Amino acid sequence: MDKFAEQRISSRELFQGRLLRVRIDTVKVANGLETTREIVEHPGAVAIVAVTAEKEIVLVRQFRTPTGEVLLELPAGVPHQGEQREGSARRELAEETGYHAKNVRKIWEGYASPGYSNELIEFFLATDLELKSPSPDEDEFVEPELIGVAAAVALVRQGEIRDNKTMIGIMIADLFLKGELK
Amino acid sequence: MDKFAEQRISSRELFQGRLLRVRIDTVKVANGLETTREIVEHPGAVAIVAVTAEKEIVLVRQFRTPTGEVLLELPAGVPHQGEQREGSARRELAEETGYHAKNVRKIWEGYASPGYSNELIEFFLATDLELKSPSPDEDEFVEPELIGVAAAVALVRQGEIRDNKTMIGIMIADLFLKGELK
């Protein structure tokens, strides 16, 4: 697909933080025009669709500094250095909700906002859950909340889920319970 | 919800670009601990779920610099200064695909990645479409592609849609055609 080809002329790092790296690239697009792209590099994330034997999905409520709101979301997080994604999914679920999953498998993956970020979110389905104690990071305050999957689907349809990965996670839980997930 | 309260101690701007502003906040969380948050400010985006009379969804293929991949996505973009969101949705759809929509209505909105970004994506359903000529931005190369909604749903279930807003858009198109969208 040559018409999509883009040639990088130069790249300048603007910021290197604990989580994010921000750079600005100057690129030449297919018609020869030069333009700049503002890019956020992110290590990627895991999001966990945990479904109980009672057909509930395990969500978490937390304050999000960037949005200034308390949001209802899938448990999720960034893998530790060198950590396998599946292990990361198990760890984040346990830390944020106290649920330990016997079965964890990857379902899909998708970019969060590919226009400016390379953050890829990998979605894991977690089943056969056992509840122990949550152990969130010391700067993380999350409150687990169980919602029947059918009720969660209704929340999506009513526009009451305000986080994209969580809309997708509820769709995954619904397909799983209907036996329609490959 | 006091346990979620977070107090901002200070905020430092790291970058102000054409699209993004990046800052680092020092905050005090509920247990008194101070920590930093790396935050990307984004003006927000519109994504358009355009469904033809033939029950097809209008997607676009484009190269994304941050991910280094050609992705199949909903038409989407950032509103111009002062532009109403619905007008922005009409404009982006027309520019990227050539489709002009008689009916446009907002369905849902969701954050793309609320852990570090305030980008809110508003999803619009566009119907009663008329095809004219696309007029993309001069540094934008997009290729429209029509896919039957049922086939698009199958692509999601097979994990072949690698963009979160597009998974959601296909779900919206499917609900619309089933008459299940409020």
Image (spheres, coloured by chain):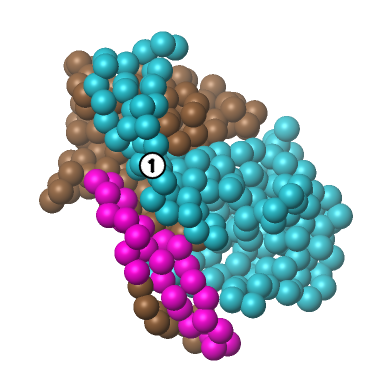
Chain colours: A cyan, B brown
Q: Position of residue B31 (x, y in %)?
A: 58, 87
> Was residue B162 drawn as part of the magenta stretch in this picture?
no
Q: Quadrant of the C terminus of chain A?
A: top right
Q: Position of residue A2 (x, y in %)?
A: 41, 11
Q: Is residue B62 visible?
A: no
Part of the protein shown in magenta: B12-39
> Was residue B32 drawn as part of the magenta stretch in this picture?
yes
Residue found at x 72% / y 41%: A106
Q: Is residue B1 above or below residue B91?
A: below
Residue found at x 49% / y 86%: B2
Residue found at x 77% / y 44%: A105
How dense is the environment of label 1, judged by Cα within 10 Å: few (below 14), some, or many (20 and up)? few
Instruction: Please tell me which residue lies in front, A127 or A29.
Output: A29
Q: Position of residue B69 (x, y in %)?
A: 50, 26
Q: Position of residue A88 (x, y in %)?
A: 73, 54
**Residue furthest out toward the top:** A2
Q: Is residue A129 visible?
A: yes
For residue B145, side relative to residue A44 (left or right): left
Residue found at x 68% / y 73%: A136
* Label 1 residue SS: strand
For residue A170, side relative to residue A127 (left or right): left
Residue holding disc 1? A12
Identify which amino acid the numbered label 1 is placed on.
Arg
For residue B130, side relative to residue A159 (left or right): left
Instruction: Please tell me which residue lies in front, A18 or B41.
Output: A18
